[in-house]
Amino acid sequence: MMQVLSTGHIYLVDDDASIRSALVGTLERQGFSVTPYPSAAEFLKHATPVSPAVIVLDMRMPGQSGVELQAELTRHGWTTPVIFISDESLPAQIVQAMKQGAGDFLLKPFSMQDLLTAVDRGLEQDRATHTVLIKARAVEKLYITLTRREREVFNAIIAGKTNKQVADADGSAAATIKLHRARVLSKMQVNSVADLIALTSQVDISALKSKP
């Protein structure tokens, strides 16, 4: 389970010990908690997800590169924003990092203000992502209480269909569909169709449909 923090956390992954030491000291004085890692392998071995957080990641390191670590984190479902830092990088690497969702790219030597700006932006993004995730989980918990028929009506409601349209499609009585719709609203803990649509506006409905 992801730990939720009241302040921001920074994962710092850089093979240069002097840079790690300098950045840790500066960032901690700014009020952030920081966990440094000397390599991608050490990060993968020891890091646990917290939020809000950002990953400050050296692009070019011995062994697994920053871009390779970013790709692996994406495959494992990490959504923590990534800020790349590097003293030199090939344009192709920068393009790949951005395509994989990197939030910022800072070329060494960068100013601390530029880093702090990127960190603040990343933390705000992670807070928003975490809020959506919490909302999705809450909707999922309610959705799985619906019966098969109620889920069919739920999907019809989200698709904007009226009671009559649903009834005409499967031969049911409009009054029966109205009853199912009322049960759906009750179980989803909303008072109206508009409330239900608002509740699910940031949720992947296709993922809900796959729930047993």
Image: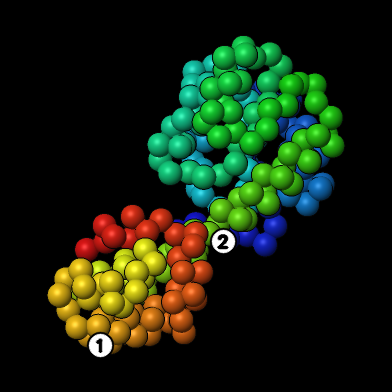
Residue 40 in view: no
- Relative to 2, say whether 59 is above or below: above
Count of marks, rendered view: 2
Compared across the picture, whether 2 is left or right of 149 comes to right
> Residue 68 got which mark?
none
Callout 1, which amino acid? Ala
**Element class at badge 1:** helix
* Quarter in which the N terminus is drawn: bottom left
Could you tell which of marks 1 and 2 lies nearer the N-terminus?
Answer: 2
User: Mark 2 packing: few (<14 Cα in 10 Å), some, or many (20+)?
Assistant: few
Residue ID for mark 1: 175
Callout 2, which amino acid? Thr
Say which quarter of the image contains residue 17.
top right
Query: At x 63% / y 25%, what residue is drawn?
Result: 58
- Name of the residue lying farthest toward the left: 171
Q: Nearer the viewer, residue 141 or 170?
A: 170
> Residue 131 got which mark?
2
Compared across the picture, whether 199 is left or right of 171 comes to right
Query: At x 39% / y 78%, what residue is drawn?
Result: 188
Residue 44 in view: yes
Query: At x 57% / y 17%, what residue is drawn?
Result: 93
